[in-house]
Image (cartoon, rainbow, N blue to C red):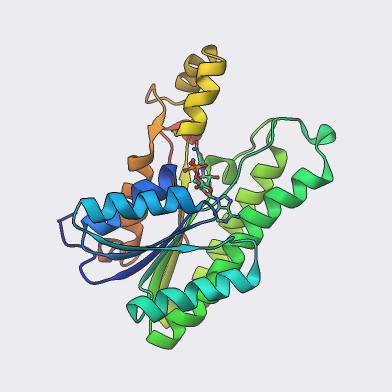
Amino acid sequence: MTGNTFAGKSVLVTGAASGIGRAAALSFAAQGARVAVSDVDTTGGEQTVAMIAEAGGEAVFIQADVSQSAQVQALVEAVVARFGRLDCAFNNAGIEIEHKPLAESDEQTFDRIMNVNVKGVWLCMKHEIAQMLKQGGGTIVNTASVAGLVGAPTQPIYAGSKHAVVGMTKTAAAEYGRAGIRINAVCPGVIRTPMMDQAIQREPRRQKMIEKIHPIGRLGEAQEIANAALWLCSDSASFVTGHQLAVDGGLTAI
Ligand code: NAD
């Protein structure tokens, strides 16, 4: 992708205070986009904005909890007030807080995961699509997971939430394709993030286990998911919609 793929475009990234969202926000800005960095985490979000500014890009932080309807509506309104429109949205905020088989999981964990991972993506798409219809088009990428394509032992609720993201992505793509809105999902394998680094430090044998399940022989990097999200948002993917792109080092190939 050339250096100016998103020149002048208005882009929203949720969950952009950390990990995959931060890598994507930095990449969109490096490709010329004006980026709305959103997250519940103000400190991390402001850091992402500072990193973009340091690199000569344009970004603003807008705090929002994606599971709260009024906050998501205000978020999309704030992006439009600031940048005039919303060309691309990367709905990436998500939580993974579950490490038990299904019969041992509890209702509170179910509600928390579903509220952020499913309701959050639904609310974001609902308000983003309304804006994109007004302006005549746009692109949306939702972060699902390999756990949205196959089962994930000890993460049954998370897997359910990510399958739901894939289902909403396909359906919305079918509903709004003729309106010029392309909607896709990216499905990461296991990605090196601060949280994953900590888990490996606590239990070093995890690293070997994770490497083993990826035919490519290693964990993925946040930048590798960001690259896929940017491609899906770009005109290079102009005939791609309703797709769930596994970026997983071959994990779901075997
Ligand atoms: P991360 O924890 O580094 O980043 C997630 C961000 O989302 C955080 O900044 C967090 O504050 C934010 N967030 C959490 N709840 C929120 C809410 N209610 N509203 C707004 N923001 C909220 O994790 P990451 O690995 O970068 O994860 C990003 C996405 O990728 C998630 O949807 C996750 O499920 C998905 N994913 C990650 C992996 C992996 O191995 N890291 C694999 C597959 C899918």
Residue 174 visible: no
Q: Which quadrant is the N terminus positioned in?
A: bottom left
The percent position of residue 222, horizontal first and vertical second, equals 38, 40
The percent position of residue 32, horizontal first and vertical second, equals 21, 63
Q: In the shown orientation, is residue 32 left or right of residue 21?
A: left
At x 45% / y 75%, what residue is drawn?
78
Between 218 and 93, the one lying in front of the other is: 93
Quadrant of the image occupied by residue 53 = bottom left
Vertical side of 187 occupied by 213: above or below: above
Between 39 and 192, the one lying in front of the other is: 39
The percent position of residue 243, horizontal first and vertical second, equals 45, 57
Vertical side of 86 occupied by 1: above or below: above
At x 43% / y 36%, what residue is drawn?
248
Residue 147 visible: yes
Quadrant of the image occupied by residue 28 = bottom left
At x 26% / y 58%, what residue is drawn?
29
Q: In the shown orientation, is residue 130 left or right of residue 240?
A: right
The percent position of residue 113, horizontal first and vertical second, equals 68, 48
Q: Residue furthest bottom?
A: 134
Between 125 and 30, the one lying in front of the other is: 30
Tally the numbered discs: 0
Q: Residue furthest top?
A: 205
Between 63 and 157, the one lying in front of the other is: 63
At x 82% / y 40%, what residue is drawn?
106
Q: In the shown orientation, is residue 236 left or right of residue 199?
A: left
